[in-house]
């Protein structure tokens, strides 16, 4: 029987200061993993790392890097290697949607203001969201996975989304990018299959976080939007998930419990992807 044998491993969590990934970092630290919180927001990264050290008495550092800037990732890797040695685990968590890449209209009738539809999407906003989610997974993997290949062991976990299987309305760039993340997960899993490095993804269902609040809660009334009602009606468990509900799958994927598992995308979604709506 293989074990959850990750004590003293070194894990880099990009977007580690955020809603979901700070909890992922905490779950790794709770099992004795040395964690590196890599985030564009240095202050928040330091705060999460400090809290982790206090709570779990496990070394943790916060580092500032932009997942779209290879030089900043390489600079962070040097600090990590100097402080902790080789990297064993990478969680590619930085990502998300933005209002700049979101249409106002769900389904076109044909007589709307074009600005509110696909035709009004600004390519700059589209690029920003697509790049953050896709290249923001690709580049950190290029930088941080080198140690894993060298030592012939490691685990990479990408954070995908429900919209990677079937796109959600309004958020074309985010959907396309997360679909690309799934495809890349499979591609890299095969590419690395003989190196001892496994590559998998978690596709969370709906959690109420900072990035989707504007779509799910009416700003004026504080009530759930029609979109939020649809989400809850489409989630058989009829509630949002919470970050701690993703961590069991994470611990499975980064440890020898999943030794023969590579190239999969695991939904953790309260049944959303299984439900036809009828
Ligand atoms: P969040 O905004 O709370 O966290 C994202 C973190 O990434 C932030 O700390 C932010 O500072 C950091 N970040 C942003 N751009 C960066 C960059 N260029 N370089 C480095 N760091 C950067 O978001 P979240 O809701 O915790 O989402 C985390 C991941 O989970 C994302 O990939 C998101 O797409 C995915 N996800 C979220 C949900 C949800 O319901 N919240 C559902 C499915 C998937």
Image (tube, rainbow, N blue to C red):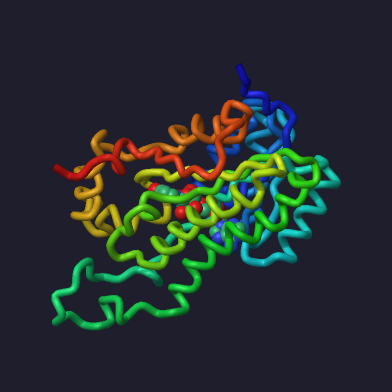
In the image, residue 3 above or below residue 43: above
Q: Residue drawn 49% across and 73% down?
A: 127
Q: Residue drawn 73% across and 33% down?
A: 9
In the image, residue 193 above or below residue 30: below
* Image quadrant in which you'd find residue 100: bottom left
In the rendered structure, the answer to whether residue 43 lies left or right of residue 114 reads right
Question: At which x and y percent is residue 270?
Answer: 32, 36
Q: Which of 56 and 260 is in front in this view?
A: 260
* Image quadrant in which you'd find residue 106: bottom left
Question: At which x and y percent is residue 11?
Answer: 68, 40
User: In this orientation, does residue 151 appear?
Assistant: yes
In the rendered structure, the answer to whether residue 5 lies left or right of residue 171 reads right
Q: Residue drawn 13% across and 42% down?
A: 278
The N terminus lies in which quarter of the figure?
top right
Question: At which x and y percent is residue 153?
Answer: 72, 38
Question: At which x and y percent is residue 166?
Answer: 32, 55
In the rendered structure, the answer to whether residue 84 lies left or right of residue 203 reads right
Q: How many marks?
A: 0
Q: Residue drawn 82% across and 41% down?
A: 85
User: In this orientation, does residue 44 appear?
Assistant: no
* Image quadrant in which you'd find residue 119: bottom left
């Amino acid at each position: 029987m293989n074990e959850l044998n990750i004590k003293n491993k070194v894990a880099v969590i990009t977007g580690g200061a955020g809603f979901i990934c700070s909890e992922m970092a905490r779950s790794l630290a709770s099992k004795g993993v040395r964690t590196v919180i890599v985030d564009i927001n240095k202050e928040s990264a330091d705060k999460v790392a400090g809290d982790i050290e206090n709570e779990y008495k496990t070394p943790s550092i916060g580092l500032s890097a932009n997942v779209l800037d290879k030089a900043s990732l390489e600079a962070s890797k040097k600090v990590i290697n100097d402080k902790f040695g080789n990297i064993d685990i990478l969680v590619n968590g930085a990502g998300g949607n933005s209002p700049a890449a979101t249409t106002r209209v769900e389904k076109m009738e044909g007589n709307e203001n074009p600005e509110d539809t696909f035709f009004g999407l600004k390519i700059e906003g589209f690029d920003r969201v697509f790049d953050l989610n896709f290249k923001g997974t690709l580049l950190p993997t290029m930088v941080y996975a080198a140690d894993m290949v060298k030592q012939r062991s490691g685990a990479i976990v990408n954070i995908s989304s429900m919209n990677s299987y079937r796109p959600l309305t309004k958020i074309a760039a985010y959907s396309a990018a997360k679909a690309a993340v799934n495809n890349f997960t499979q591609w890299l899993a095969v590419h690395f299959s003989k190196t001892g490095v496994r590559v998998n993804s978690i596709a969370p269902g709906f959690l109420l976080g900072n990035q989707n609040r504007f779509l799910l809660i009416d700003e004026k009334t504080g009530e759930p939007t029609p979109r939020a009602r649809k989400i809850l009606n489409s989630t058989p468990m009829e509630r949002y998930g919470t970050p701690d509900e993703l961590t069991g799958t994470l611990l499975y994927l980064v440890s020898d419990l999943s030794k023969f598992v590579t190239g999969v995308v695991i939904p953790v979604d309260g049944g959303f992807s299984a439900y036809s709506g009828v």
